Amino acid sequence: MKSFCQYAVALLVANLWPGLSIAQTVATAVPTITLDDAIQRSQNADSAYASAKANAGVAQAQRTIARSSLLPGIVYHNQFLYTQAASVSALTTASNGSTTPPVRFVSNNTIHEYTSQGTVTETVGGAGIAELQRANADAAAANALLEVARRGLVSTVVNDYYSAIAADAKATIAERALDEASQFGHNTEQRETGGEVAHADVVRADLEIQQRQRELNDARLSAEKARIDLGVFLFPDPATSYTLASSLEQLPPLPSRTDIDAAAKAHNPDLRAAMEALRSADLDVKAARFSYLPDLSVSFLYGIDAPQFAIRAPDGTRNLGYAGIATLDVPVWDWFATHERIKQSDFRRDKARVDLTVTQRQLLASLDELYREAEVSQQQLGLLDKSVQTAADSLRLSKLRYTAGEGTVLEVVDSQNSVVLAEAGRADGAVRYFTALANLQTLTGSLP
């Protein structure tokens, strides 16, 4: 059904663009996905990576907010204030002879008061500087965790990518095995007709054909499942048809252990995230302790604060003016709130130290395990290549012996099974090596 739909779409496109043949249209309708394409597409389809990316963005915004709190703030303040007047008997006489009734609130100047001022305010305190430093550490830790999520996603995509290639290879192996079994069955029937072999050989060859057909059906189903699993990261519709550009024959080399150790120490995102988390916890303690120290706030105002919303008063006096305010707030008593905040920060710092120690130990253990896994899988690949070659030679010799009347049908069938198992094992071994190398590269920062 899917192939029919593709053909129908291709026929429609060919009618719209007569220069393209239907075969060309079908070919261009199916995208070819490289490993880099798969990694790039997967970053738009993974919720864990999207969550880590959002957290990194939030941490970056928080760093900007913390930095802005240390810079002078500018506000253009506008206000109209109405205050109830006092009794008429309490009139006051100004120097120019005019009378102004006093207001009932001593903090206000006149019945109608207009304020239009530009205000520049700056607060100087150690807590704000420590908060900025902590926000920088949090942002660095969030970026490191984003890299952890990205590398974990890349490792998963690499495994799914080469698993899909291996599944396709196994389907091809199963098709080739079915063709081999069918050809052998045909030859057996011909030899039975010539009286060279017994009917039992034909029956055994037919059983082998049935077995190969079942294996082919299972291999095709596994290949389709593997492609759908990978398609979840690639397309809105996981069932979209695509081809894979890489193969299991192009094996990247395994770096030396010295290079792996050096890269892991310099570029491991888990270790960097733990170190930045500890630095953030240290700065959190520092910021909490700054609450014991006073803060100095300085403000400068320029504008009008007068009974008229105008540059000049009715008597010609200029309303525009400026003022400066300096405030020093000295903490005296807060019922041990600052003390408890420092204790909270100390607890978080202790936990961050333990997390860093655990991360360092896990890094050393993971390096040993993953590098050994990559080494063994690489060695196994060499043995599997020899097994494939040996099994192919064994099948060739078994068929020659059977044709010459010196071998049995069971020897040929056994050789066919050995070839299938060796080729399938080689495909699994390649996936194992690619996966082990990808897992190792998550610790070293050398992933794409």
Image: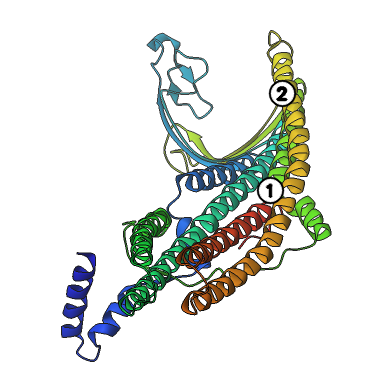
Residue 283 in percent (x, y) is at 75, 33
Task: Tell me: residue 88, above or below residue 98.
Answer: above
Which label sits on residue 201? none
Q: Which residue is mark 2?
A: 345
Residue 433, located in which quarter of the rendered image?
bottom right
Task: Tell me: residue 147, above or below residue 207.
Answer: above
> For this view, does 378 lie left or right of residue 61?
right
Q: Which residue is mark 1?
A: 269
- Judging from the image, what secondary structure is the residue with disc 1 in? helix
Give the residue drawn at x 73%, y 21%. 347
Q: Is residue 294 visible?
A: no
Residue 142 in percent (x, y) is at 62, 43
Front residue of 97 and 10: 10
Give the residue drawn at x 51%, y 15%. 106
Specify few, some or many for label 1: CA neighbours under 10 Å numbering under 14, 14-19, or 20 or more: many
Give the residue drawn at x 69%, y 42%. 273
Give the residue drawn at x 52%, y 74%. 406
Q: From the image, state whether disc 2 or disc 1 is nearer to you.
A: 1
Mark closest to the chain's N terminus, 2 or 1: 1
> For this view, does 18 lie left or right of residue 161?
left
- Judging from the image, what secondary structure is the residue with disc 2 in? helix
Residue 218 in percent (x, y) is at 37, 55
Front residue of 396 and 140: 396
For the residue marked with disc 1, what is the amino acid?
Pro
Quarter placement of the N terminus = bottom left
Q: Please, which residue is most extreme toward the bottom here? A: 19
Residue 427 in percent (x, y) is at 54, 63
Q: Please, which residue is most extreme toward the front here? A: 195
The chosen color scheme is rainbow
Specify few, some or many for label 2: CA neighbours under 10 Å numbering under 14, 14-19, or 20 or more: many
Front residue of 429 and 107: 429
Residue 83, located in which quarter of the rendered image?
top left
